[in-house]
Amino acid sequence: MKFVDEAKIELHAGKGGDGVAAFRREKFVPKGGPSGGDGGRGGTIFIRASRDINTLLEYRYRRIFRAKNGENGQGKDCYGRSGEDLFLDVPMGTIIYDETDDSIIFDLSQDGQIEQLCKGGKGGLGNIHFKSSINRAPRQFTYGEIGESKSVRMELSVLADVGLLGFPNAGKSTLISAVSAAKPKIADYPFTTLHPHLGVVRSGFKGGFVIADIPGLIAGASDGAGLGHQFLKHLQRTKILLHVIDVGTEYPDTASITQGAHEICQELQKYDESLFKKPRWIALNKIDLIPEEEREVFFEELSAALETGLASSEKIFPISSISLSGTTELINSVMEYMSKLEETK
Ligand SMILES: Nc1nc2c(ncn2[C@@H]2O[C@H](COP(=O)(O)OP(=O)(O)OP(=O)(O)O)[C@@H](O)[C@H]2O)c(=O)[nH]1
Ligand SMILES: [Mg+2]
């Protein structure tokens, strides 16, 4: 599924340092000439594309970026130091729009591509530049120029890395809203989610990964039951499927939970064998509804039951999308998995 990750930021290049008017004061040189140096150039803001970043998440937390100002010039022919340039790293594929007229400024399609976004202001001139045959003691100097400023929008089309799968009401939307900034509708009735949503999860992996929340599936979806199963196509290019199972509501009916899990996997297999064969993990959700002291035994029993059929999964994570217990472990495991995939690429 295509999804647009977006961030709006404000950029201010550095101001140039002012030039200065100064005169030489040296022993035995009674009337020293002008010696005021130029101001340094203000820092320029560049944008740099990198294949090592996945999302624009970083730019949703920090929105204003300023490059350093140039230093003012000084006496004794000293020039001010230039302000340091600022490089903003964005994922390859990011498109930069000018917020004022919505025009495209850059389309960063190459890894390592660097473009100048906001030019730093020129430094002012010191009075050494104004010396002439008719004016040997000029007092003129100029001020540094203001750096360029811009408001830009960055857009990136991203594909989901993780796809959520499960019955209506399993808590898929609650999970995505717990681990990402996405705010899908959540309600205690089936088929709350009618359209797929994506959420970006902040993690150490390339600045985050993307989870897709799709409408719930039910048995018979391949024949059109419920909302049907055409939404599964959005999971086609994901790297992991996460099968969310509501174990809290049906606790302690292991047989019914297992049966339900198999139904989902049957629908998946009917839809597409390759999707069915994708790595699929299980999130046992709503564990907050299960008495704490009974959880361990129950999870063991349930894991054993799930292992025997279609729904078998290498990894099972007991979680609560409401109390957030277990969600960090889940996210960390996804992150590790993605990093490994990347290494073997
Ligand atoms: N106690 C408890 N309730 C949860 C948990 N996760 C979700 N719920 C509740 O379960 C109900 C369904 O949650 P949703 O996130 O809308 O479920 P969904 O899987 O997205 O459902 P559809 O969009 O209809 O497919 C809501 O009332 C949630 O508050 C959980 O971990 N614990
Ligand atoms: Mg939902």
Image: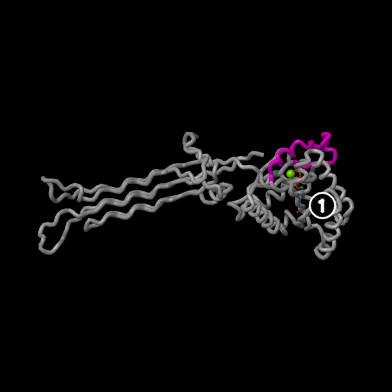
- Measured as percent of width and height from the top left, residue 98 is found at 47, 38
User: Was residue 28 drawn as part of the magenta stretch in this picture?
Assistant: no
On the rendered structure, is 275 left or right of 151? Answer: right
Residue 267 vs residue 72, the one in the foreground: 267
Q: Amino acid at mark 1?
A: Ser
- Measured as percent of width and height from the top left, residue 290 is found at 82, 59
User: Was residue 231 drawn as part of the magenta stretch in this picture?
Assistant: yes
**Residue occupying the far front of the picture:** 344
Taken as a whole, is the magenta stretch helix, strand or loop? Answer: loop
Asked if residue 210 can be seen in this view, the reply is yes
Asked if residue 181 can be seen in this view, the reply is no
Colouring scheme applied when the structure was drawn = one colour
Count of numbered marks: 1
Query: What residue lies at 67% left-to-right and 57% top-to-bottom?
Result: 332
- Give the residues drawn in magenta, as a range: 215-238
Q: Residues within 10 Å of mark 1 (few under 14, many from 20)?
A: many
- Measured as percent of width and height from the top left, residue 309 is found at 86, 50
The residue singled out by tag 1 in the image is 312
Which quadrant of the figure shows ligand 2?
A: top right
Query: What residue lies at 60% left-to-right and 56% top-to-bottom?
Result: 204
On the rendered structure, is 23 left or right of 67? Answer: left
Quadrant location of the N terminus in the rendered image:
top right
On the rendered structure, is 119 left or right of 168? Answer: left
**Residue occupying the far bottom of the picture:** 293
- Measured as percent of width and height from the top left, residue 94 is found at 54, 42
Q: Secondary structure at mark 1?
A: loop
Query: What residue lies at 51% left-to-right and 41% top-to-bottom?
Result: 108
